[in-house]
């Protein structure tokens, strides 16, 4: 079992990457290219596969508006615009009432810089925004698959980052999305993300425990 562990971890990372890359692209700020991709059969097929994997129904066929202007305005109305705040925030600090916003953002920056996630400022969002958090998880899996960083440091960083941030706020955002009746596509995407984060943390904890047991 021990000799197979690195390969098993890489296989998990590869499967996880496929899920997070779809979710990152679909939940990123709207662009014409993103809109075109989400209208193609390939996106529907990928989303249907992930829905099946996590036991969720596939959203209705008109989940993505045909016109880009409608697609963009709907995203903005869900996540960017509202009084006193948008229906759903995609920033970790919005859900953390125990620490100052600056401290939450600074902690994200320290994680990112330690593992070489560069140019996260280019996203045009604060470090604690979901698109940067998912980019960081993807970065950790890419490092795991290329063996450029020790497995233990990657696993511990992943566990700490998930526990400190996404596992705290994403389930709450998913519940809020349902309560506030966001469009079906966004309810599905955020609920999928919550389930993926839960599974990610469970698998990461299991891998850490196994490695600690083997060292005894």
Image: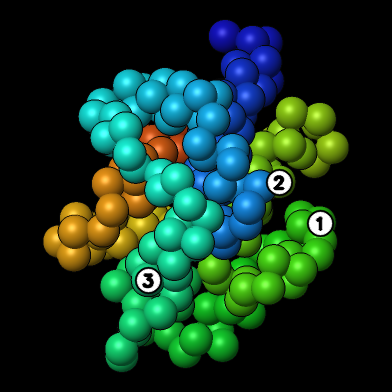
Q: Count the marks.
A: 3
Mark 1 or mark 3, whichever is nearer to me: 3
As helix, strand or loop, the secondary structure at mark 2 comes to helix
- The answer to whether 99 appears left or right of 82 in the picture is right
Depicted 172 relative to depicted 103: above or below: above
Of labels 1 and 3, earlier in sequence is 3
Colour scheme used in the picture?
rainbow
Q: Which residue is mark 3?
A: 77
Instruction: Please determine whether, in this image, residue 37 is positioned above or below residue 35.
Output: above
- Residue drawn at x 36%, y 67% as measured from the top left: 78
Q: Which residue is mark 1?
A: 116
Checking the image for residue 139, the label placed there is 2
Image coordinates of residue 206 in percent, x first then y, are: 44, 31
Circles 2 and 3: CB distance less than 8 Å?
no
Tags 1 and 2 in contact by the CB under 8 Å rule? yes
* Pick the front one: 95 or 183: 183
Q: Nearer the viewer, residue 152 or 94?
A: 94
């Amino acid at each position: 079992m021990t000799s197979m562990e690195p390969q098993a971890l890489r296989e998990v990372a590869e499967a996880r990457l496929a899920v997070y890359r779809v979710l990152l692209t679909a939940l990123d700020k709207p662009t014409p290219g993103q809109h075109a991709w989400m209208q193609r059969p390939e996106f529907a097929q990928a989303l249907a596969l992930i829905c099946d994997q996590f036991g969720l129904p596939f959203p209705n066929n008109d989940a993505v508006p045909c016109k880009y202007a409608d697609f963009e305005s709907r995203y903005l109305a869900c996540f960017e615009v509202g009084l006193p705040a948008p229906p759903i925030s995609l920033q970790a600090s919005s859900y953390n009432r125990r620490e100052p916003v600056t401290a939450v953002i600074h902690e994200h920056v320290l994680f990112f810089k330690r593992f070489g996630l560069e140019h996260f400022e280019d996203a045009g969002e604060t470090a604690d925004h979901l698109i940067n958090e998912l980019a960081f998880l993807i970065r950790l899996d890419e490092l795991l698959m290329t063996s450029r960083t020790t497995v233990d440091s990657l696993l511990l960083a992943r566990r700490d980052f998930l526990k400190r941030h996404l596992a705290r706020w994403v389930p709450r955002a998913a519940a809020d999305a349902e309560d506030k009746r966001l469009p079906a596509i966004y309810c599905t995407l955020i609920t999928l993300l919550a389930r993926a984060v839960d599974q990610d943390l469970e698998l990461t904890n299991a891998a850490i425990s196994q490695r600690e047991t083997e060292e005894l």
